[in-house]
Amino acid sequence: LLQRLMASHCLSNEEAQKIFDDLKVRNNSLEEAFETINAELTKGFGLEIATVVLEKQKYHAVINLRNDDVAANAFESSYNSHERAFVRKILEQFCSSDDKHPSFPKKDLINLRNELEDSFKITTVDHAKTVVERLLDQQFLRIVSGGRRDSMQVEVEMAPRGYLELSTFMTERGVSHDNMPQFLFHRS
């Protein structure tokens, strides 16, 4: 269950329940399985399975509880300094909205590249598109409406994994706890 959750980055409750049911493990429930896994995962690795509730749907992901070098360097291994500045700008766009779950046209997120300082400019639209696509692939962002993923008009919002892993970043930038989704932690 843990391996599938980590490989998928984030699973809906239905997906996690199906995996749990297929495994035929000794735990009585998915919740109990998460509690059992977390008891060891937290002690040994500083990781935890957590759940976020978005639009009455539960999503589960493994998150890093420690503000350590692993957490600090997570984006450094996937994004260069220009791309990290661009990702930060995208996340700040979501944080600056007064909406509870804001969404933006993909083209607006890509055009944020024009607001970067000269020393961090992403010079091409294609490069900016690639970074946004990686955020979608890694499930930090998700498509909510507008048709095809490759469309520039498609609406994009924070994905469950984005909320789970970046909640501290968001609240530090002024997102009210009232505007954050509900988080559930599986501890015995």
Image: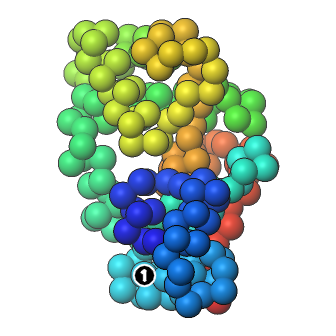
Q: In this view, does 123 lie above or below 14?
A: above
**Residue in the image at 41% along x and 63% along y:** 4
x and y, in percent, of residue 80 in the image: 21, 36
Q: Which of 143 and 79 is in front in this view?
A: 143
**Image quarter for residue 173?**
top right
Q: What residue sits 44% from the left and 88% below the top?
A: 40
Quadrant where the C terminus sits is: bottom right
Q: Which amino acid does label 1 sit on?
A: Leu
Whether 139 is drawn above or below 90: the answer is: below
Quadrant for residue 46, please give it: bottom left
User: Residue 109 versus residue 149: which sits nearer the camera?
Assistant: 149
> Could you tell whether 129 is left or right of 20 in the image?
left
Please state the horizontal and vertical placement of residue 161, each as a whole percent of the image: 52, 50
Q: Which of 35 and 123 is in front in this view?
A: 35
Instruction: Give me the residue at 70% from left, 35% from top.
Output: 101
Q: How many labels does the image show?
A: 1
Q: Position of residue 18 (x, y in %)?
A: 58, 63
The answer, for residue 174, to whether it is visible in the render is yes
Where 55 falls versus 43 (above or below)? above
On the question of residue 67 being in view, the answer is no
77 versus 33 height, above or below? above
What element does badge 1 sit on? helix
Color encoding of the figure: rainbow
Mark 1 packing: few (<14 Cα in 10 Å), some, or many (20+)?
A: some
**Percent coordinates x, y for residue 106 in the rendering:** 50, 17
Q: Residue at x 62, y 27 (%)?
A: 144
Residue under numbered circle 1: 41
